[in-house]
Image (cartoon, rainbow, N blue to C red):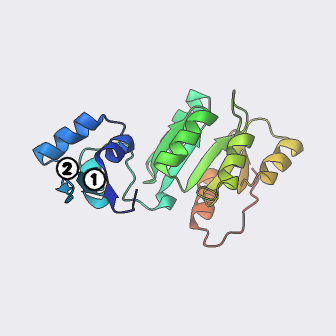
Amino acid sequence: MTDDLLTIPQAARLCAMSRGTIWKYVKTGEINAYRTPGGQYRIRQTDFNDFMQRNNMYPRAFHEPDNHRILIVDDEPQILKMLTAMLFRDEYSLETAKDGFDAGVKIMTFKPGLVILDLIMPGMDGFEVCRQIKTNADTAHIKVLAVTGYDSEENRDKILAQGADAYLTKPLFKDNLMQTIQSLLDAENPNTHRVSG
């Protein structure tokens, strides 16, 4: 796939719709498309982004820079709810994931600038999620803020060794959280921030 053109199947995958549904939008003119000399339809990425934005469709953040997108990963629904409420009014585009596997999918589709990552989760834990983010050339630039209710020197050293950019302990306090997030997203150099809470 080039940066500028999408096929019907590629557009369908981007918004989790069937090819038939995307084809319907193309035929009705809701999605601008053109035909190649071979008779295939192609959609310009900018036209598709506009269509998704007009319809508030996922992913919502195509037009926002990475540093406005935050993925919150935690297996506790109340923590997801609390963090979403804290960050909602600060004009970040937010997504949540309930476990490490869900996080992997959201990282590739939502393309966050920052992942707020719980360490202790069933299945794939935060240590492994962080390792996968930081060892993949396509995602290594993503900032990782590790958070845990199980503070220990071992956990702190282990997650920082996996490449986490900052570390905070639960309970999270809004002022400290917001200051840490801002410093990570505003950073213009690759040096990591070893913040503890």
Residue at (61, 32) in percent of width and height:
99
- The quadrant where residue 80 appears: top right
**In front: 175, or 149?**
149
- The quadrant where residue 155 appears: top right
Query: Which amino acid lies under the numbered mark 1 shown in the image of this protein?
Result: Phe
Furthest toward the right, the residue is 153
From this view, report whether residue 168 is shown above or below residue 76. below
Query: Of the residues under marks 1 and 2, which one precedes in the sequence?
Result: 2
Residue at (62, 63) in percent of width and height:
183
From this view, report whether residue 124 is shown above or below residue 55. above
Q: Which mark is residue 48?
A: 1
Asked whether the residues under the numbered discs 1 and 2 touch, taking CB atoms below 8 Å apart as contact, a structural biologist would say yes
Location of residue 75 in the rendering, given as x and y in whole percent from the top left corner: 62, 30
Location of residue 149 in the rendering, given as x and y in whole percent from the top left corner: 74, 35
- The quadrant where residue 21 appears: top left
Furthest toward the left, the residue is 28
Query: Which amino acid lies under the numbered mark 2 shown in the image of this protein?
Result: Ile
The N terminus appears in which quarter of the rendering? bottom left
Residue at (68, 69) in percent of width and height:
190
Q: CA distance from mark 1 to mark 2?
A: 7 Å
Location of residue 124 in the rendering, given as x and y in whole percent from the top left corner: 69, 33
